[in-house]
Amino acid sequence: MYRLRNVPVHVLLIAGAVSMILPFFWMVSTSFKTPQEIFLFPPTWVPQSPTVHNYVQAWSEVPFPRYFLNTIIIAACMVCGVIITSCLAAYAFAKLEFPGRETLFILMLSMMIVPQAVYLVPSFIIVSALGWMDTYMALIVPWLAQIFSIFLLRQQFRSIPNDYYDAALIDGCSRMGFLWKILVPLSRPTIITIGLFALLGSWNSFIWPLIMTNTDTLRPIQVGLSYFAQEQGTEHGLMMAAATFCVAPVIVIYFFAQKQVIESYAKSGIKG
């Protein structure tokens, strides 16, 4: 009887999984199709004559090696910066007592509802005034602190008993020592999660790099993908091939980190 009651839940979960996997399957399938087969009706789910020509042409038409290098540099700096700023801010909001702590935290959380389009122009003016246009500084510095990462890590830090802090002080540990030697090791799954989120945000960034860069030497891969969607029409085969090898590294990283992501949400008290 118990198993029968779980059937609708499993059906919904399977339907949700299929709906998420299907677009990725279609993307990969289309990337191996010829231009003629892409527009066949009814469409074919499995390529009739698989070809890697789309991958070769997409890689050669656009300087993806340079775009990948730029993306890796930007993502690495962002991940390191977000982890450091999130640890420091979350520690202050979770364990330190100072006037206006909760009010300041609520005001910071309220900034999450502000869409990017609202602060895009002011940010452009500030970056331009600093002389950072078309530099790595413009692509990295504004994103070194992320509110959701601070919130998630704060929840994790608050779940760690204050007795640990008292014991550390008795043993002569400083406040910063308590953070880096005790809180951070105990919060490894959550830190991996915020690092993964920072990586995804950097890897998928498009509007900001497009506005802040003028040359191909600094542009990331998402800007490179837009090359195949032009006024003359979208080159579907090339775009699907480029999208496949652009998203593949992130998928691989997520498969290795998914256990840590699930564990961090469970420990932080956030339910999906």
Image: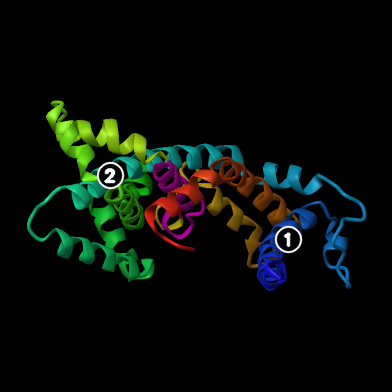
Residue 101 horizontal/vertical position (percent): 14, 58
First reached walking from the N terminus: tag 2 or tag 1: 2
Residue 223 horizontal/vertical position (percent): 53, 53
Of discs 2 and 1, which sits in the foreground? 2
Which residue extends farthest front? 1
Report if residue 197 lies within the magenta region: yes
Q: Residue at x 14, y 32 (%)?
A: 169
Distance CA(mark 2)–CA(mark 1): 40 Å
115 sits to left or right of 70: left
Regarding mark 2 in the picture, which secondary structure is present there? helix
Regarding mark 1 in the picture, which secondary structure is present there? helix
Q: Which residues are magenta?
A: 189-209
Residue 85, which numbered label? 2
Callout 1 amino acid = His
Q: Tell me, yes or no, if residue 3 can be seen here.
A: yes
Q: Tell me, yes or no, if residue 213 can be seen here.
A: no
Q: Residue at x 57, y 51 (%)?
A: 224
